[in-house]
Each structure stands twice: as C-alpha cells, then as structure tokens.
Amino acid sequence: MATLAIFGGNSLLGQHVINDAIDSKKFTSLRVWNYHSKPETRLESNNNPEIPIEYFTGFESMERIVEGVNSVINVHESHDFSVKPDSVEMEEHNVYFVEKLVEACQKGHVQSLIHLSSIFLQCTSLFPNVNSREAKPLDSKFVPFKPYVDTKRRAEDLLMNHDGDLQIVIGRCGGIYGEGDVSSPICDAICLIDKLGYLPILGDRGGVYQMTYAGNIAHSMLEILSYLERSASIRREIVILRDETPNQDIYSSTLIPILASSSSRPISSSNLPFFLFFPFLCFCAGLNWICNIFGYSTRLQNLPDPVYIYFLLRHWTFFSDFKQRILFSQTPKFSYDESKNRSAKYYSNLSSDQIRKMSWQKCSY
C-alpha cells in the first residue's frame, strides 16, 4: 500500500483510523477528507505524524482525493436520533455522498473500500437483538430510527449491487467510545454529572447495548484492507465489527468503569425506575409531534427519540463477531482493560464545555 484515503477524518472513528494508519507504518502518506470543517487532531498522537497528511474538503474534491489511491476507508455519515430527525441531511450524507464516492472510486481505479454502516439495520425495537450474525436489513414497522436506517440501507444496497471491480466490505458498528470523543452516551453522562453533581442511574440496568472501543474498530478496518490485498476473491462482504467490551447494560460496560475512576464524578447509589421517566419522554415526543402537525416548532424537538433511550437503557442489542473472527481472522488490538484505561484517562479531563452535541442530536462528520 502507498497512500490511504480516509473520508470522515474529524469523526471519532476517523481520528482513530488516522492514528492507526500512522502506527501501522503501511502507508507512505494519507489523504483525509471532511465535509466542510477544518481538519482536527483530537488525538495527541495525530499532532506530529511521521508521514505526510493531505487534507481535502467538500464534495467537489472527492475525485481528487482518490486519484492514484488503492484503498479507501469511509467513516463519514450523518445521524439524527432526535424526535424530529433531519431526513434531508441524512439523505445527502448517507446516500448521495456514497453515490459520489463510488463514482469517484470507479474513475480513480480504487481497488478496495471499507464503508461504515450500523447494527441498527438489523435491529427491531419489538424483540431482543441477541447475538445474531450478519443479516439483510430488516423490513418492519418496528425498525428503529427509520429515516437514518433507510438511508444507511440504501447506501448498503448501492455498494452491494455495484457491478465494478471494486472490493467492498461494509462494517456494521454499534456505539463507540474512546479518546477524541465529543458526542456519545458517555459524553451525555458527563453533561449530566456536570449539571447534577453526580451520575444518575436511569432505569433498572436490565438492558444490554453493544459498545466498542473506537481504536479497535479502526484497527479492524485497516486489517481488513490488508486481508483484501491477500484475498482477491472477496468482492462484497458485510461484517459486524466489535471487540471485548462486555455485553452488559451501558452503565456496567462503559459508564461506571470509565467515569467512576474520577473521584469528582460520583455515581448515584439509587436509580430512577424506567417506567417513571420513559412514559414522560414518550408524552413529550407525542406533544412535539402534535405541535409539528399544526406548524409549531418547539424546544421539545431537541429531545431524543424515546426509542433511542429504550435501546440504550432497556432493550437487548448485541451481535456476534463470528465473521470478524473467522473469515477475517480479526482479534482486538486492545483488550477491554486497555480500552477502559485509555478511555478513562481521556474522559477524566473532558468537561461538558468541550462536548459538541448530545449523542442523539443531528451530527454529520
């Protein structure tokens, strides 16, 4: 490999892909694309890279960034899990962008593409999503976050049905955490702590939500690129990417282990029952829906979709890494303890002033 092109470099995952690409010493240079913002280096190790990095911005630069490049990693996407999601923006970033990316890769004779997708495509809010392997996107009225899932599904269809020589692997991920994070459930918890003085326990901690360390996802993507170099027979694959972060409720797997290391962030000794606050959230979402029907815009539209909170705190959502381990021979670069320790050091110095948005709010990286 000579030059690697990375789309979505300012995202949490993008920052870790840049870092791991530098550490791998497999590339002579990097090209990093962002939609409209200036390049960021939220990881200390990215401040003084050992290889040259060239930055690009905007749709008009997509063909230039892939010119002469063999491999592309795309972690650019838009999500909005609020009660009033911006479907137009997700259409632009999750579908139109991918169309342009594939066209650019085809013109530039790119050999391999790794594309970020979501485990939500094979989730339902009605039944537990427990340890399943890769499957076709569900077509059900119980699919969560339909505007988001619909655009990600169409992007997957476009990639899987591409008739060119481009090798394509789609990596479906759940929630991620790690250094450089400025918008995630862990950041939400930090905002709550700064306002309340402690971390409240919302719900009975009876659910399971799959979380993964960003450094391990980034490393897996780069290792899959290396695998594709050796296995030309692989043309299209979908793989669930995860690590050793345990299948537990989000408090047990990440919030408490990572945030409780700081004495300034105490954890509540009692919990607020799920059946008390969740109906209130549903009521607010319904009220916002009624206001929108009559053309009124309210501050309630900044609230999370109740289904998002249900998935985080009550539902069971975790998937099998069988294909990741067996087909691609992937093992996490960092153990769970290493991931916790690296993350805890970062989050202990992160204040709510540094957090960009709540995790459910509209975000395009």
Image (spheres, rainbow, N blue to C red):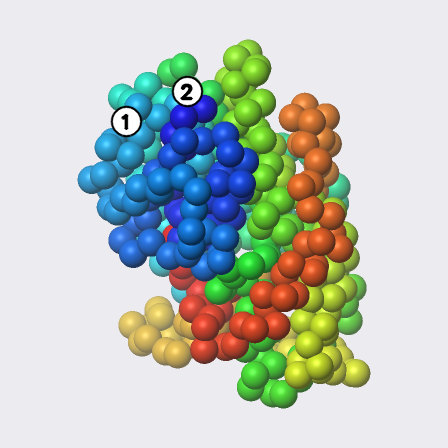
- Circle 1 SS class: loop
Residue that mark 1 sits on: 67
Q: Amino acid at mark 1?
A: Glu
- Residue 60 x/y as whole percent: 20, 40
Q: First in sequence: mark 1 or mark 2? A: 1
Q: Quadrant of the N terminus?
A: top left
- Residue 345 x/y as whole percent: 63, 66
Q: CA distance from mark 1 to mark 2?
A: 12 Å
Q: Quadrant of residue 154?
A: top left
Q: Amino acid at mark 2?
A: Gln
- Circle 2 SS class: loop
Image point 51% across, 34% down: which residue?
Answer: 25
330 shown above or below 129? above
Residue that mark 2 sits on: 111
- Residue 291 x/y as whole percent: 37, 75
170 shown above or below 44? above
Q: Nearer the viewer, residue 246 or 37?
A: 37
Label ID, residue 339 = none
Image point 71% across, 53% down: which residue?
Answer: 338
**View extreme (top): residue:** 233
Indicate left or right for 315 with 236 as reference.
right
Is residue 94 visible in this depiction of the protein? no
Indicate left or right for 260 with 155 as reference.
right
Image point 58% across, 79% down: which residue?
Answer: 192
Indicate left or right for 57 with 153 as reference.
left
Count neighbours of disc 1 (C-alpha within 10 A) and say few if under 14, some if 14 to 19, many if 20 or more: some
Image point 24% across, 46% down: which residue?
Answer: 58
